[in-house]
Image (cartoon, rainbow, N blue to C red):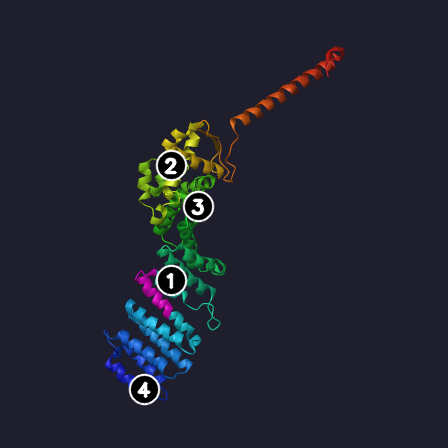
């Protein structure tokens, strides 16, 4: 219920020209309302503004003052209750398109209140209602980006990468027109976080690492993004592309200061085998989505470690029985064979599998990363080609000797050469 003071002032309004009286009430509002009635009083003022006949200019002035007054209280509960009511009234108004600036300000205020309450889903929904493409309201590309970046960040707070990506795609079409350094940084960070959430770890690592060089953020934040870059690189599928990303991170002088991440980064870069204890310790620093279970029942981290160790084994052995390989990788023989075959097929490992003998043969050199490029020829094929080379070499030597004999002893050659 509205306060008595406010009720009396509203009752005394000039019925012919109530606009100036309403504006005066808003200017004196804090003296007419108390802490217990502030919410009801603001809602009452909102209702009265749309109940009486006001010109558009006068209505805008009163709404602007009403919004400024609401903002001055800094009470999230009041912001949400009054803001939602005011937004509804504006949308129901006959000439609601004349109040788009006020509607945008209300939605932004309500979204801020929801963000303060850590209700990020509702915050994103309110921000999405801000009119950005209306012909009645001119909005710069920078303002659009500012709203979309907030929506993306809100959705990422609740791990809704699908909804976040839909707004990131909108950002991609206009971000090149925005020169605000902070907005560009938030865009890059959001892009890296979405790639991280989608398990596109190599792209995420590169994005985080680029951001870690930005002078626009504090040193602590730069080290944090560097740490995220290292974690994403470690979780990426083993292969030549990841090796290049690991090399770039390993050569970053700052990486050595991140003790927990650097120890496993160094082992991966130098192709050393990782122990279960090291993996367990590293897993404690990962986020929930980075420990999610994949379709085959293993975690992202476990899969990345198995593939890395398989690459490490390929550098230690020329060939190895599948059973022994399985023990080194901590898998059963069938799973070890499946993992090896997949990496060979995807061009991330050079080798071949002899299923009859139960052996895996490794070929020296770095895989290209192209699908199908990891298969090497069988031993029989290599021996046949070597035999062909030897036969060709012998034939060339015989021809050289026969030519020399013909030049020195032509009569002998004519009598004894069989064609």
- Which of the two labelled residues, at mark 3 and mark 1, occupies the earlier sequence position? 1
Q: What whole-number distance in Å separates the C-alpha atoms at marks 3 and 2?
A: 18 Å
Q: What whole-number distance in Å separates the C-alpha atoms at marks 4 and 2?
A: 79 Å
Looking at the image, residue 134 lies above or below residue 357: below
Residue 361, magenta (yes or no): no
Residue that carries the numbered disc 1 in the rendered image: 124
Q: Nearer the viewer, mark 1 or mark 4?
A: 1
Q: What whole-number distance in Å separates the C-alpha atoms at marks 3 and 1?
A: 28 Å
Q: Quadrant of residue 10?
A: bottom left
Which numbered marker is on residue 116? Answer: none
Instruction: Please state the extent of the stretch shown in magenta in the rendering.
Output: 106-120
In the picture, which quadrant includes the C terminus? Answer: top right
Q: Could you tell me which residue is drawn at 63 percent across and 22 percent down?
A: 392
Residue that carries the numbered disc 3 in the rendered image: 202
Left or right? Give the position of 8 relative to 352. Answer: left
- Which of the two labelled residues, at mark 3 and mark 4, occupies the earlier sequence position? 4
Mark 3 and mark 2 residues within 8 Å of each other at the beta carbon: no
Label 4 environment density (alpha carbons within 10 Å; few <14, some 14–19, many ≥20): some
Q: Nearer the viewer, mark 1 or mark 2?
A: 1
Q: What whole-number distance in Å separates the C-alpha atoms at marks 3 and 4?
A: 66 Å
Residue that carries the numbered disc 4 in the rendered image: 13
């Amino acid at each position: 219920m509205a306060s008595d003071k406010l009720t009396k002032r509203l009752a005394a309004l000039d019925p012919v020209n109530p606009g100036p009286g309403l504006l005066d009430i808003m200017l004196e509002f804090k003296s007419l309302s108390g802490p217990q009635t502030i919410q009801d009083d603001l809602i009452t003022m909102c209702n009265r503004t749309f109940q009486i006949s006001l010109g558009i200019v006068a209505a805008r002035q009163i709404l602007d003052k009403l919004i400024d007054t609401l903002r001055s209280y800094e009470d999230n509960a009041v912001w949400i209750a009054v803001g939602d009511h005011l937004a509804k009234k504006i949308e129901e108004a006959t000439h609601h398109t004349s109040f788009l600036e006020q509607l945008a300000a209300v939605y932004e205020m309500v979204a801020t209140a929801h963000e303060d309450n850590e209700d990020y889903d509702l915050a994103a929904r309110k921000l999405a209602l801000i009119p950005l493409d209306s012909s009645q309201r001119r909005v710069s590309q920078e303002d659009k980006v500012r709203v979309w970046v907030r929506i993306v960040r809100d959705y990422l707070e609740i791990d809704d990468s699908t909804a976040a990506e839909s707004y990131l795609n909108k950002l991609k079409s206009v971000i090149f027109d925005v020169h605000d350094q902070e907005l560009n940084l938030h865009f890059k960070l959001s892009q890296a976080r979405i790639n991280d959430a989608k398990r596109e770890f190599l792209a995420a690592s590169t994005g985080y690492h680029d951001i870690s060089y930005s002078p626009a953020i504090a040193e602590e934040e730069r080290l944090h993004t560097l740490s995220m870059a290292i974690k994403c690189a470690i979780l990426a599928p083993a292969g030549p592309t990841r090796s290049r990303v690991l090399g770039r991170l390993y050569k970053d002088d700052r990486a050595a200061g991140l003790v927990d991440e650097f120890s496993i980064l160094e082992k991966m870069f130098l192709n050393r085998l990782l122990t279960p204890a090291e993996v367990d310790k590293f897993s404690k620093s990962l986020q929930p989505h980075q420990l999610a279970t994949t379709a085959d029942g293993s975690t992202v981290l476990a899969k990345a470690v198995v593939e890395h160790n398989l690459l490490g084994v390929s550098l230690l052995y020329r060939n190895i029985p599948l059973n022994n390989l399985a023990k080194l990788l901590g898998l059963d023989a069938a799973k070890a064979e499946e993992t090896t075959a997949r990496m060979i097929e995807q061009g991330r490992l050079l080798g071949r599998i002899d299923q009859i003998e139960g052996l895996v043969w490794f070929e020296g050199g770095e895989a290209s990363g192209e699908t199908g490029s990891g298969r090497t020829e069988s031993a029989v094929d290599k021996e046949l080609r070597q035999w062909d080379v030897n036969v060709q070499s012998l034939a060339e030597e015989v021809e050289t000797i026969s030519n020399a004999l013909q030049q020195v002893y032509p009569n002998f050659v004519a009598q004894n050469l069989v064609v």
